[in-house]
Every structure is written in structure tokens, then in C-alpha cells.
Image: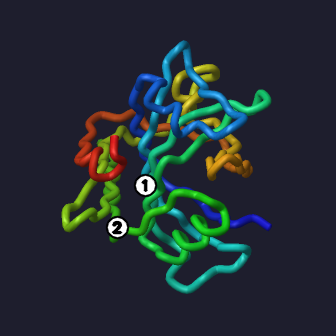
Amino acid sequence: MTFLKAYWKNLILINYEVDPKILKPFVPLGTELDSYNGKYFVSIVGFLFMDTKVLGIKLPYHVNFEEVNLRFYVQRHGERGVVFIKEIVPKPLITLVANSIYHEHYFTAEMKHQWTNSETSKSFEYQWKLKDRWQSISVETETEFISIPENSEEQFITEHYFGYTKHKNKTFEYEVVHPSWRQLKVKNYTINIDFEANYGL
């Protein structure tokens, strides 16, 4: 049975090129780091879960909520996938089930989001509280959606359909099903993150 089924809305993806040596301790057994034109990336992804079902059931107060995660990219048997280093949500039950049963790396924090529209731009922001300090990512974009070009860096970042989890000496695989994304061109962005406090990086 599918653990979590939901509609993901208004994703922010912030991407950093990194030295692959930093990621090797997190790579699950049987997978290998994936790259785009020789570049290795980590991504901070913020979005809103909507119409969420946990094990097929809509739980009260667990239907719509934020998530911010840190992920990187791997391959296994020719399949491209993601590995999550940390996934922040505001719901302790999601954290408990995901970590104990599925060996994920969820963390519970107070969270909030804000979306605004004008005639000339859209704005999206996700915030989470860590040790009494608010962390945040936000972008201002143009208003018209555009397609993601084939074989582009944007497609490499967005088009992954498997997730892999490292737990002791085992690798867990699960399928991630989503439609092909469209994108909004970013005009401005703000990143307010204590990387060491959040991720130890």
C-alpha cells in the first residue's frame, strides 16, 4: 500500500553544485551518484502537501501541510532517483510513521507558508522554526508558466521517479509518481538558512 499520496503544489527548488565527496557517505548501497554534464547537485525543495492520504486514509489535521527537504540524485539499474538527507514537516505523526516504518529522515518543526500574486509577479515562501529561529526560502517569479526543455538541467532536477533510503547496510526503494512539471522563471530569491544547524553541512 502507498504510504503517502498527495498533490504537491507550488514547489521551490534551490540547487547547489557540490563536491561529490560530500555526498558519498549518504549514498545507499547499490546506487551511485548521478550527475548532469559532470555536475553533482543537492536541492532544497519546499512545497505544500495537499489532499494528503496516509496509508489511504485522510487523517484530521494532516491533509494540507508544508514540507522542506534536502535531497540529491542517484542512479540504480538505469533508474534515476533521489535520496533525501532530511525532510522537515509540521506533523509529528508523519515523522513517526515515515522514520519508523520506511526508514526515512523526517524531522518535525513548526512551519508556515505564504503565496501572493500580482499583475506582474508571483511570490512563494516557506518557513520553518529551528531552535527558536525562523528559517526560510522564498522566490519571486514571473506569472506565466513555461515548459521544461528536454535534456535540460531543469529536467534533470525535476524528473525523478524513485526514492532510495539508506538504513544500516540495506537500501529501500520506493516509487515517486508525479506529472511532468512546468516552471516559472525566477526574478528574485531569498535564502535564510543556517545550513550547519539544519543539516550539519
Residue 84 appears anywhere in the view: yes
66 vs 117, left or right, is: right
Image side of residue 6 versus residue 2, left or right: left
Q: Is residue 64 left or right of residue 82?
A: left
First reached walking from the N terminus: tag 2 or tag 1: 1
Crowd around label 2: few <14 · some 14–19 · many ≥20 (10 Å): many
Q: Quadrant of the N terminus?
A: bottom right
Residue at x 49% of width, y 47% of height: 85
Q: Quick one: which residue is furthest to the top in this view?
A: 37
In the picture, residue 100 is in which quadrant? bottom right
Residue at screen point 30% across, 34% down: 187
Position of 22 relative to 56 (above/below): above
Q: Is residue 46 left or right of residue 174?
A: left
Give the x, y percent position of residue 62: 53, 77
User: Which residue bears the numbered disc 2?
Assistant: 111
Q: Nearer the viewer, residue 113 or 27?
A: 27
The C terminus appears in which quarter of the rendering? Answer: top left
Contact, mark 2 vs mark 1 (Cβ under 8 Å) = yes
* Three-letter code for the amino acid on which mark 2 is drawn: Met
Judge by depth and name the residue closer to the eye, 144 or 185. Answer: 185
Q: Which residue is mark 1?
A: 68
Is 90 above or below relative to 121? Answer: below
Q: Is residue 125 above or below residue 142?
A: below
Residue at image location 67% in from the left, 49% down from the top:
178
Task: Give me the residue at 23% from left, 47% from top.
Answer: 192
Residue 36, picture quadrant = top right
Q: How is the image coloured?
A: rainbow
